[in-house]
């Protein structure tokens, strides 16, 4: 039993380490103001002991530090861009399919933007490159319902300047604040507030340009394409449909037309530009008619197999409708098929 007790004592000593033998805790050596002064032997000079972290006095005025992130020009329109390192409230616009003539497009957008907001816009030159705005006000609303009131905090006027490149495909728009008035302490400009307001107004204009581009894109998409397809005769005197497009362009777009005409492609031979087709008379379903969908386009042909053969012409491509044996259809059948083909081209929105 005694042997077990001794072993337990030894184990406990090993686990606790040297702390068992430490008689007293070591006092920390405090620093700072409690450090004893340096003792200098007799006959020697006491060294200078400057105070720690002394900050010299300064007569410089205390200025506020700008802690907000900088305002950024957001080039959200497809035609807009910002040049790297730009310091001013300036954006560049480049001509594309949606803008057309660039400067007239931007001038029109600018007029719409300020007219809708009820802000006066004055042209200050003869070329339509410089404009000044009326007072643009900012206000705070307090209360609610019948007790709601509006308090004007500030107002400002701006100068807008277009700078077109000589080639006319790029135009920059720069905004500058001309005047500012504030009526409450909240409306007072601090730091870069003037530039923030310039950029905020510029971003509104860029956003409006982007919306106008979307309107133009949707109008172009909804526009019915022009159809160059016409009935005629090929070099051999066979009745055909004639297109001004090249044979490769016609070949690549025909399958969309076939879908609109209820023609199924069973085979094709690109080497001789021939489509092998299966035609079935289309029928409009109940739900399709209920929802007011356009009725299917019907060809004046009986159900069966047909061929469509393309050939190069001096001014485009000929499309020859033939029966399953390769015999050209009669002139009347081709003429009767012309209008359904035109409708199918318009519905497929292809260029034929």
Image (cartoon, grey):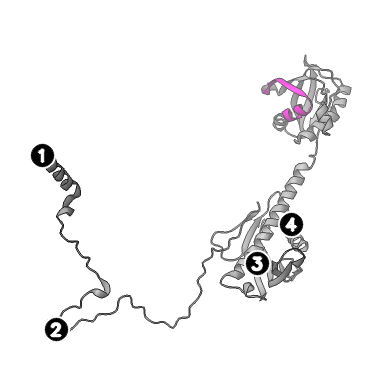
Left or right of 351? Residue 202 is: left
Q: Which residue is mark 4?
A: 105
Q: Residue at x 78, y 63 (%)?
A: 115
Q: CA distance from mark 4 to mark 2?
A: 88 Å
Q: CA distance from mark 1 to mark 4?
A: 104 Å
Mark 2, mark 1: which one is toward the viewer?
1
Q: Which residue is mark 2?
A: 44
Magenta-drawn segment? 254-270
Magenta span includes 169? no
Q: Is residue 99 visible?
A: no
Magenta span includes 265? yes
Q: Which residue is mark 1?
A: 3
Compared to 330, does 40 lie above or below?
Answer: below
**If you read the primary sequence from the N terminus, does the residue marked by circle 1 or circle 4 appear first?**
1
Compared to 40, does 254 lie above or below?
Answer: above
Compared to 43, does 336 lie above or below?
Answer: above
Q: CA distance from mark 4 to mark 3?
A: 18 Å
Compared to 138, does 300 lie above or below?
Answer: above
Name the image quarter holding residue 246: top right
**If you read the primary sequence from the N terminus, does the residue marked by circle 4 or circle 3 appear first?**
4
């Amino acid at each position: 039993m005694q042997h077990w007790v001794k072993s337990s004592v030894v184990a406990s000593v090993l686990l606790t380490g040297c702390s068992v033998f430490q008689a007293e805790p070591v006092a920390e050596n405090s620093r700072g103001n409690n450090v004893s002064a340096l003792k200098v032997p007799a006959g020697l000079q006491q060294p200078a002991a400057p105070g720690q972290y002394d900050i010299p006095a300064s007569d410089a005025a205390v200025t506020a530090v700008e802690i907000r992130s900088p305002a950024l020009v957001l080039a959200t329109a497809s035609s807009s861009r910002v040049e790297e390192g730009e310091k001013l409230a300036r954006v560049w616009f480049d001509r594309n399919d949606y803008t057309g003539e660039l400067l007239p497009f931007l001038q029109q957008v600018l007029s719409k933007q300020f007219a809708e907001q009820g802000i006066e816009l004055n042209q200050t030159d003869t070329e339509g490159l410089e404009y000044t705005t009326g007072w643009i006000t900012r206000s705070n609303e307090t209360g609610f319902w019948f007790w709601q009131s509006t308090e004007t905090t500030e107002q400002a006027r701006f100068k807008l300047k277009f700078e077109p490149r000589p080639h006319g495909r790029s135009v920059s728009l720069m905004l500058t604040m001309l005047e500012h008035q504030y009526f409450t302490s909240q409306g007072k400009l601090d730091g870069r507030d003037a530039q923030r307001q310039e950029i905020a107004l510029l971003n509104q204009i860029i956003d409006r340009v982007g919306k106008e581009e979307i309107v133009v894109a949707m109008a172009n998409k909804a526009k019915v394409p022009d159809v160059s397809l016409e009935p005629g005769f090929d070099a051999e005197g066979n009745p055909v449909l004639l297109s001004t497009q090249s044979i490769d362009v016609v070949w690549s777009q025909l399958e969309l037309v076939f879908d609109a005409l209820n023609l199924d492609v069973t085979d094709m031979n690109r080497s001789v530009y021939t489509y092998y087709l299966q035609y079935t008379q289309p029928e409009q379903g109940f739900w399709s008619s209920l929802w007011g969908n356009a009725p299917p386009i019907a060809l004046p042909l009986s159900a069966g197999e047909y061929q469509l053969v393309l050939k190069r012409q001096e001014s485009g491509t000929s499309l020859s409708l033939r029966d399953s044996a390769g015999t050209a259809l009669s002139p009347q059948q081709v003429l009767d098929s012309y209008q359904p083909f035109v409708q199918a081209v318009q519905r497929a929105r292809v260029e034929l």
